[in-house]
Amino acid sequence: KALDINDGSVHNEQVCLENDTSGSGNMACNAKNSIFDAASNNRTTSLWYNADSVSGNTYRYLFEEGGGTNGQSIYIYNDRIYGCTWKSNNISCGDHATTANEWHQVVLVWNAGGTSNIYHDGVTNTGDAQFVGKLDKNSNSPATLGGIGSVSRVEEGKTREVSTHETDIVCELPHQSACEFKGIIDEFRVTNELLTAAEIKTMYNSESNANFITVSGDT
């Protein structure tokens, strides 16, 4: 089901992707879960989005996991979409141009210490979209869609948290609306595998066109 997040005057909506540590089984944005937190050498994260706006110096988080030290994220800033990983405070990102008010697919494929890419609408390039993945350590921090759960980082390495420092951006509870995403998110997927360019192209084609996959004359 597609998620229409922070619609109109609504703020601070986000989807928590990890179980509550109290054992209640509920989802919580202060939780921990090995699916996202355990160290991994490889990961592919994909989703579809339709952003209300992409322009201006506003950070709009679609997906974020981790904290200020180790983590990963997908966010929009100044007409571009970024896929980032960071380890021990060192960040590396790929980016791609994007547009508002239409559907796009974004895929973040990272290989710790190796060639990593952000794919947009099924394609990537060896320029801005390619980077060296950083993350292969435990993060032990929340994972969310539509905002951040605690603290994150931006491409230039700045932390996003409540701070009086001019180099930091207010984007931590209870001020996370400064980095919220306004729009629709759908088809969120994550796997600890490196999907190939051909697999990502096939996934894009199949998800964007109901007639792409045909079996015995039926779609």
Image (tube, rainbow, N blue to C red):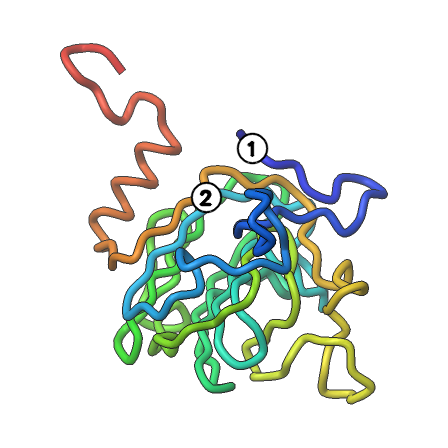
Depicted 182 relative to depicted 138: above or below: above
In the drawing, does residue 161 fall left or right of residue 211? right
Secondary element under disc 1, as helix, strand or loop, is loop
- Direction front: furthest residue: 23
User: Mark 1 or mark 2, which has the lower sequence index?
Assistant: 1
Question: Front-most of 101 and 190?
Answer: 190
**Mark seen at residue 102:** none
Instruction: Specify few, some or many for label 1: CA neighbours under 10 Å numbering under 14, 14-19, or 20 or more.
Output: few
Q: Name the residue located 30 percent from the left edge and 21 percent from the top edge.
A: 211
Q: Position of residue 190 (x, y in %)?
A: 38, 50
Instruction: Specify few, some or many for label 2: CA neighbours under 10 Å numbering under 14, 14-19, or 20 or more.
Output: some
Quadrant location of residue 218?
top left
Q: Name the residue located 68 percent from the left edge and 42 percent from the top edge.
A: 5
Q: Quadrant of the C terminus?
A: top left
Quadrant location of residue 58?
bottom right
Secondary element under disc 2, as helix, strand or loop, is strand
User: Disc 2 designates what residue?
Assistant: 188
Question: Front-most of 205 and 28?
Answer: 28
**Mark seen at residue 2:** 1
In the drawing, does residue 193 fall left or right of residue 66? left
Q: Position of residue 108 (x, y in %)?
A: 39, 59
Query: How far apart are labels 1 and 2 at the CA level?
Result: 9 Å
Q: Position of residue 115 (x, y in %)?
A: 27, 74
Q: Amino acid at mark 1?
A: Ala
Depicted 65 relative to depicted 17: above or below: below
Q: Amino acid at mark 2?
A: Phe
In the drawing, does residue 174 fall left or right of residue 185? right
- Direction left: furthest residue: 216
